[in-house]
Image (tube, grey):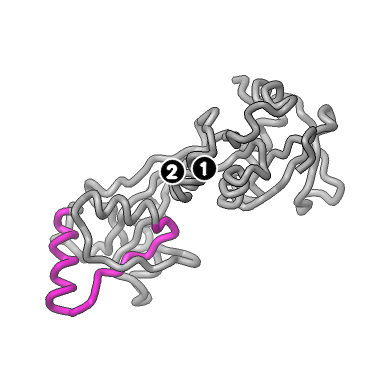
Amino acid sequence: MTKDILNIGVPSKGRLRKDILNIFKKHKLNLISERGERDLLGSIKQFKNIKILYLHAREIIERLGDGSLDIGFSGFDLLKESEINTQKKINVLKRYDFGKATLVVAIPDPWIDVQTVADLEEIAFEFKDKKKKRLRVATKYPNLTREFLFSKGVTQFKLIDSLGATEAYPFIGSSEIITDITSTGETLKANNLRILKDGEILRSEACMMISKSSNNKMGLKKIVKLLSKN
């Protein structure tokens, strides 16, 4: 990475991309992409030493961790899901009032006897003793899910990596329950899933973060100050 160039990671798609681009627009920073919206590289008209890289929100966290990005915009949930060594290399500079969502434990509606995580623990042991298998939990957040369930005393479960619409997994036989990120809970309800009363794992929002290895880079404080203005 060139010493004098600042690399800024922006989400490549979705609502988060739109909201982050609005921050630049609000502060009159003109983003340029030669090939339009599908371009993965860009620049800021007013700052010749800044490159914009459009990346998946999860990759932004990884690239901040290895220092190939200096500044990045992503979700707090994705930071906390990353490996501890990665988290230690990143500072959260600003939390925004958009991109708000909550990671939760959700179960099928017909499980009327299960209201709390303690009830879930009983079910997990029942699965192990009577069905000779572990309760399966589908998720895109294995680290946060494992940490949360262990902290609540639930140990007899198996994590299933979700590659798509996690809320469908209990109804296609791929898992018994799920953990998923939700803004309103409406999608879970629409898919006959219910959040446990004490099933909140983490509250999240969009954040501006920097790589600790970039703290002293020339021009960093100037652009951070500009992007941090309300």
Percent position (x, y) of residue 13? 64, 51
- The residue to which callout 2 is attached is 101
Percent position (x, y) of residue 216? 66, 26
For this rendering, which residue is in front, 167 or 135? 135
Q: On the rendered structure, is 198 left or right of 165?
A: left
Q: In the rendered image, which quarter contains the N terminus?
A: top right
Q: Residues within 10 Å of mark 1 (few under 14, many from 20)?
A: many
- The residue to which callout 1 is attached is 75
- In this rendering, the answer to whether 68 lies above or below 135 is above
Magenta-drawn stretch contains 139? yes
* Residue at screen point 20% across, 64% down: 111
Q: Secondary structure at mark 1?
A: strand
Which region is colored magenta?
Answer: 118-142
Q: Can I make out residue 122 in this image?
A: yes
- In this rendering, the answer to whether 189 lies above or below 64 is below
- Identify residue type, mark 1: Gly
* Residue at screen point 48% across, 50% down: 82
Whether residues under marks 2 and 1 lie with C-beta atoms below 8 angstroms apart, the answer is yes
Tally of numbered tags: 2
CA distance for labels 2 and 1:
9 Å
Q: Secondary structure at mark 2?
A: strand
- Identify residue type, mark 2: Ala
Q: In the rendered image, which quarter contains the C terminus?
A: top right
Percent position (x, y) of residue 78? 49, 47
Magenta-drawn stretch contains 200? no
For this rendering, which residue is in front, 81 or 21? 81
Question: Which mark is in front, 2 or 1?
Answer: 1
